[in-house]
Amino acid sequence: MSDAEMPDSGAGCGNPGAGRAGAPEKPTRFIDSVNCAIEGILYASRTQRHMRRHFLAALVLLVAVLFLRVSALEFTLLAISVAFVLFAELMNTSIEVVVDLVSPDYHPLAKIAKDVAAGGVLVAAIGAAVMGYLILSQYIFPVYKELLDMIGSPTEMGTVVALLMVVIVVVILKSISGKGTPLEGGLPSGHAAVAFSIATIVSLTTRDPLISILTICLAVMVSHSRLLLRIHSPREVVLGALTGTAITIAVMLLFRLLN
Ligand SMILES: Nc1ncnc2c1ncn2[C@@H]1O[C@H](COP(=O)(O)OP(=O)(O)OP(=O)(O)O)[C@@H](O)[C@H]1O
């Protein structure tokens, strides 16, 4: 529980006796119990960055649901998935706090307890992602396909020109920033730029949203490996990805305009 806060033992819900008799009292009224539950959720949001991310994802999903006009059944399935992820994160936080209480020092069993609880959150999140994909892809894929159709299929010449331009722009930007070599380090990441350029070309060639997502996943993995190897910073990788994608799309649009 790296960023957890030590709770204030005197203040909080359902302990009106605190401060008077000294010892906090358990909540007796229903409203006090509800307040305690809300305090638990607030504690988890305040101390667990993953909880905040889950809430943010839930907000994004709600906005998407509003725009995509999913059916009531689909909304129910999505809501259950999101609630399950939030529930798992709350249970994970609770287990972390209990483990820290019982075993503040390193203990192999404490590690297993926390790792298993974290595994529960991961399983819930993967389930929600699969559910989200299966439901939302029916609405998003046709729009995405239309977008790919608007840019058009790349010609062989367009592909070669786009890739060469990406490499040249990366070298120029690296020489301006004065950091790194053509193949290692500096701003932007050349690997990310080329990986995203290839992902864009494959997406436009196949015009298949699923293949597009899979190749983008590969590009993300290539970019992530540059971070893991500590060759690039997140900023350099993101700029590389944007450079590769933007130049490739621009070249494709230009070829479409000229032919
Ligand atoms: N007392 C301990 N004994 C052994 N290993 C521990 C202990 N505390 C934490 N760990 C290890 O560190 C990992 C992270 O624990 P921590 O309490 O920091 O959770 P966290 O950073 O909030 O993680 P999460 O992303 O799961 O919410 C645990 O999964 C566990 O492997």
Image (tube, rainbow, N blue to C red):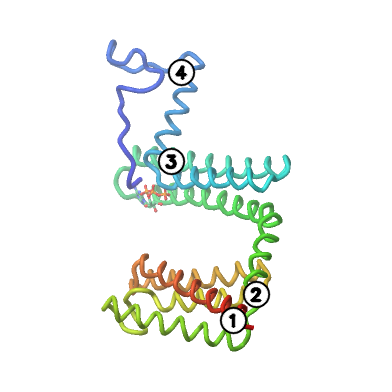
Q: Is mark 4 in CB contact (under 8 Å) with mark 3?
A: no
What amino acid is found at the position of numbered circle 4 in the picture? Asp
State whether label 4 is within 8 Å of ligand 1: no
For the residues carrying marks 3 and 1, which lies nearer the camera in this image? 1
**Residue 144, position as x, y percentages in the image:** 65, 63
Sequence-wise first label, 2 or 3:
3
What amino acid is found at the position of numbered circle 1 in the picture? Phe
Q: Residues within 10 Å of mark 4 (few under 14, many from 20)?
A: some
For the residues carrying marks 2 and 1, which lies nearer the camera in this image? 1
Q: Which residue is mark 3?
A: 93
**Residue 5, position as x, y percentages in the image:** 31, 38
Occupied quadrant, residue 179 = bottom left
Decide which of 126, 242 is in the foreground and name it: 242
Disc 2 from disc 1: Cα separation: 9 Å
Q: Which residue is mark 2?
A: 152
What amino acid is found at the position of numbered circle 3 in the picture? Thr
Q: Quadrant of the C terminus?
A: bottom right
Residue located 36% across and 23% down the image:
12
